[in-house]
Image (cartoon, rainbow, N blue to C red):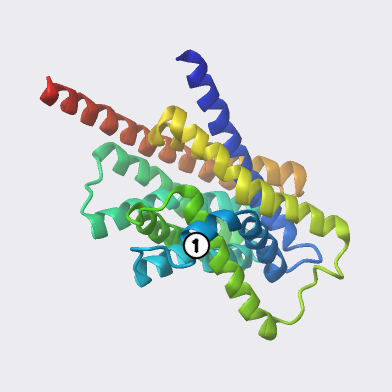
Amino acid sequence: MQQVMWTGVAAALAAALLGSAWQLLTRHGVTTTLGPIEIALLRYGIPALVLLPVLRRVGLRPAGLSRWRLLALVAGGGLPFGLLVLAGAQLAPAAHIGVFMAGTMPVFTALACLLLLGEAIPVIRCIGFMFILAGVAWLGLSGATLLPGAWRGDLLFLLAAVAWAGYTVAFRGSGLTAWEGAAVVNAWSSIGLLALLPWTGAPRLLTAPWSDVVLQALGQGVLAGLLGQVVYMAAVSQLGSSRAALSSALVPPMTALGASLLLGEQADLSTWIASALVACGIALAALAGSRTSVAAATVAKSSSA
């Protein structure tokens, strides 16, 4: 049992590391010879090719999946989401991705579940969300004076978080496995990118330095697109969804630290304060979910006795 716990903890830490690495690679990628379209092609095209056997089994339009749910899956977890993040990364530092996008994802997801599914939000989780919003407001207000123009990127990160919340709710009722959902979303995203090429021009993948292309191919397509999903699924299976979600609290400070060490984007005091507030908020929200799960299991056990 203890070995299973440590395996889950290791997988959760790996998932947090990969999530932070994806944010750093995204910020780095848009500052090189590659643009958002080229990076998106690597991000969605590589997983789409690898998951073709899964797609052949479920199809582009899985049986029983409504048109609107499919649209929400692709828009919230696929190309539109990715382009929002990539466009935002051109305008704001990497640390802002961790705070404004990764930090607010739990808030918008909970609100979507409340409005669309009628799920109540526990008090402890609300307190956690207040910490997150305080961190977002802190960085937003300080960034408006320290980094003029970054607010546009921050807004795009918030829109990406809203899109991801829609994806989360749509996926919960889709009846798809994680791999099936990934196969469908990546396939439709790749088709959308191919449709955009006549208007965006020929991608720079063939003319860009090979070092830029290989780095983004490994980071976007392999690490983020495939390996990140594998290790997070392993964490959820070993620890449960609530405990596994605690790992995401590490992402904002890890991204801020990585941006400072690897990208030369020195984080000021406001960034560290915001990252700490968001991290504490995510941890509180996840712990609230864990306590709710334990309470539900206790009630179920009592009723079956």
Residue at the spot x=49%, y=62% of the render? 160
In the displayed structure, does residue 305 sit left or right of residue 167?
Answer: left
Residue corresponding to mark 1:
160
Residue at the spot x=51%, y=27% of the render?
A: 8
**Is residue 131 at least partly visible in the picture?**
yes
Single out the residue that lies furthest toward the front: 57
Judging depth in this view, the residue of 132 and 248 nearest the camera is 248
Residue 10, relative to residue 197: is it above or below? above
> Which quadrant holds the C terminus?
top left
Please tell me which residue lies in front, 3 or 108.
Answer: 3
Is label 1 in a helix, a strand or a loop? helix
Q: Quarter of the image for the N terminus: give it.
A: top left
Q: Position of residue 60 (x, y in %)?
A: 49, 67
259 vs 55: above or below = above
Residue in the image at 40% along x and 32% along y: 240
**Residue 206 location, quadrant:** bottom right
In which quarter of the view is residue 82 placed?
bottom right
User: In the orientation shown, which residue stands out farthest toward the bottom?
Assistant: 199
